[in-house]
Amino acid sequence: MQYRISFLLATLICLFNFALTGKAQNTNTDASSKPVILYSGTAKKYKIADIKVEGIKNYEDYVLIGLSGLTVGQTITVPGDDITNALKRYWRHGLFSDVKITAEKIKDGEIWLKIWLKQRPRISEIHYNGIKKSEQKDLEARLGMAKGMQITPNTVDRAKILIKRYFDEKGFKNADVIINQQDDPKNNEQEIVNIDIDKKIKVKVHRITFIGNKAIKTSKLKHLMKKTNEKGKLINFFKTKKFINKNYEADKQNIIDKYNELGYRDAMIVKDSVYQHDKKTVNISIQISEGQKYYLRNITWVGNTLYSSEQLNFLLRMNKGDVYNQKKLTERTSTDDDAIGNLYYNNGYLFYNLEPVEVNVVGDSIDLEMRIYEGRQASINKISISGNDRVYENVVRRELRIRPGQLFSKEDLMRSLREIGQMGFFDPEKLQPDIKPDPTNGTVDIGLPLTSKANDQVEFSAGWGQTGVIGKLSLKFTNFSMANLLHPGKNYRGILPQGDGQTLTLSGQTNAKYYQSYSVSFFDPWFGGKRPNSFSLSAFYSKQTDISSSYYNQSYTNNYYNSIYGYGTNYNYSNMRNANKWLQMFGISAGWGKRLKWPDDYCTLTAETSIQRYMLKDWQYFPVTNGNCNDISLGLTLSRNSSDNPIFPRQGSEITLSVHATPPYSLFDGVDYKSYYKADGTITQTNENKLHRWIEYHKWKFRVKAYTPLMNPVTHPKCLVLMSRAECGLLGSYNKYKKSPFGTFDVGGDGMTGYSSYATESVALRGYENSSLTPYGSEGYAYARLGLELRYPLMLETSTNIYVLGFVEGGNAWNNIKNFNPFDLKRSAGFGVRIFLPMVGMMGIDWGYGFDKVFGSKQYGGSQFHFILGQEF
């Protein structure tokens, strides 16, 4: 027996006695050229004289040697841990399939090493089998596997896990993933990776069973499970029925949170199981231990010096005898806008902490001790802005309500984020401040990482009208810089100077000789750059000619012969234009606005003066047919906008009250306008033209919108939002015999947001045809509109915003202000979608159904489609 043991030992020594290798064996048996290393002998120290690398072509030698941790001149022990650790480092990187380190020469206390590496193959092609192209794109982004990268066992294992997790989130709980590697015959040391995926059938929920629930009905518990619902139930028709483990875990927590809200602090899920019902569905069984219901007995405050216990109890809104509602406790201490935490944070106490402690539980009663650490006030040390490549930094900083040296205020910080979002240059959905408190110095650094987005808009459209093709081109530059206009160079991006956040709009629309319209406008939100005082300037010109009567006669003749003989004559387009009948308009306006401090700084007061001139010649489409009409008016607008997002608001409101008025010429010009009318109240065309040479009116409008989130927008950015709207307008006169035909309200249809013709202001009322409530002869001198809109966002990305909506609304218009009745409205309902693209703006389509008769007829209501361009107030 001893002889056999000695023989085995001798054999092992022979296997290890010639070299150092990654596998602890000598692969080169040429003893004459390689030194002999005896692992059974005493370890010796050597100085590394040289290191060579073989087997790898794609990397520099110094990079590969660096991975080993060995360097020339280093003293190592042989045999010892230095070589072993070097081998471990190579294996740890996972880039090599074989590693060997050998001693090539040993002389005079120095050692020459050779590192032999075999590289793992690289990927030449990746083939996904069994899935859709969209799923393949998602997986490519998740896996990070790409052509040219090395493939390792870890890469394969990670890919399998991520693929199964991806399909598990989509409801394919039983998906199989097989990853095969094969040599690429065309490329040496490269492999083709085949990823075969069998998604199997989506797993849905067949039945959910609850055991032990008494305080909450089973139907209520099922309702709490937002994303785990039973199939085959009408109540769940619009809900997801797929079983996804991640959503299931979240839904179980929803159940416990509800019990805690009702006072059952000890409620817990004792046991739950998910088991197969058939190949397509699973059953879920949940056993609940409710425990007893608890109530508050005593609430005491400890550590508060700034605010009395009575003040804090008032803010807490939880009293003795109330149900021990843990959800309300969290809301009133930290998450609500008027929570106790915000009281401290808004006054600089950033290091404040509140810990509710249950100090005594007697029967069903709980004593709470509210332990407060107030700490010292924190001042702002530094505010850094990153990610801004759109405007000058001072343009962003002037919108901030926080400054270095000020006390920290959460309210001011959130307001600053809101103002940055309202600028339109940055994605409001990605505004997340980076707050770095320093308790030692009592300071805080605030970082504002911004995600830029393009918001310049280009509109190019063409349509076919009675007189041929009508083309429109509109350019809106929202980051214009007037100060740099004469300083070309680095301040220019493209053909225009940019960086100051000013808006320049150029627009042109033409139908050659028949119709032309041009406009230009400029708006500076910080005129002068020091205060938030706005300045605006705009001008426009348009000309429209009439269509000749010969064209109408030819069109009639053509239709007549076509109906009788089946053919007609050709249109003579050269005779269409009647250059002797036209309407020309031009105007200019200037405005100035100031941000107010009372009643709060969400309010703005704007003053505007405008001059418009209408020149008509034989224009039969308007009460005034010949002559010049002049409109000089002054407007005042008081507005308040506290909405949190310019594209998809979730909370806040928008309120506008405006009045535009001309001088009351008829009160001091000494003209008896009653004499213009005949005894029967009619007026001749000549007198009609003279009557409105100087237009006079006073126009009042009130509009309000309010946004109410139906879920917490902080925790649920994609939440349902209820938008409520109310608006009305009146166009009055100083003299009942000089009632202005200009500036009336055109009610019905899509409203074409922001569009105003020369005589009317469009007001949308979906479900009815355009202008159906105010046809010619029944112009609107008063209108009212009420509405509710339920919105839900489908996509809120930097480049695209999409949301769907359902609406109910009512509106009406009256030819006489005395008949104004906000309860006599034409009702409608419908649904639609909105898409916001940075280069295009807001656009959408609505379907509405008008329920009421208009002027005794239903032909103007019923089913109507409306195309929306622009963002409506």
Image: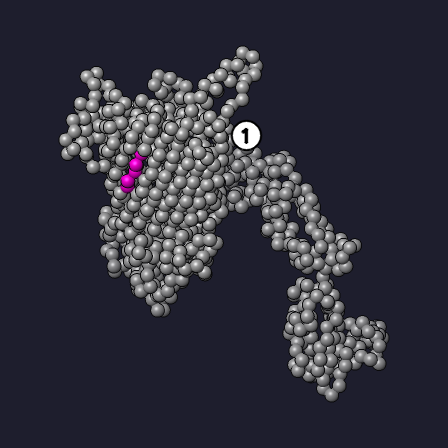
Question: Is residue 580 visible in the rendered structure shown here?
Answer: yes
Q: In this view, does 871 lie to the left or right of 797?
A: left
Residue under the point 48% across and 28% down: 574
Placement of the N terminus among the 4 image quadrants? bottom right
Coordinates of residue 740 in the picture (x, y in percent): 26, 29
Is residue 539 one of those drawn in magenta?
A: no
Question: Is residue 295 visible in the rendered structure shown here?
Answer: no
Task: Please state which of residues 550 and 542 is positioned toward the viewer in this rendering.
Answer: 550
Tell me, what colour scheme is on the image?
one colour
**Residue type beneath disc 1:** Gly
Coordinates of residue 348 in the picture (x, y in percent): 30, 60
Count of labels shown? 1
Q: Is residue 487 left or right of residue 526?
A: right
Extent of the magenta region:
610-614
Coordinates of residue 275 in the picture (x, y in percent): 59, 39
Task: Please state which of residues 710 and 738 is positioned toward the viewer in this rendering.
Answer: 738
Residue where numbered disc 1 is placed: 232
The kind of secondary structure the magenta stretch mainly shows is strand
**Furthest residue toward top:** 564
Q: Which picture quadrant has residue 293?
A: top left
Residue under the point 19% across and 34% down: 665
Q: Measured along the vertical axis of the image, is residue 27 above or below residue 746?
A: below
Coordinates of residue 241 in the picture (x, y in percent): 54, 36
Q: Is residue 68 left or right of residue 471?
A: right
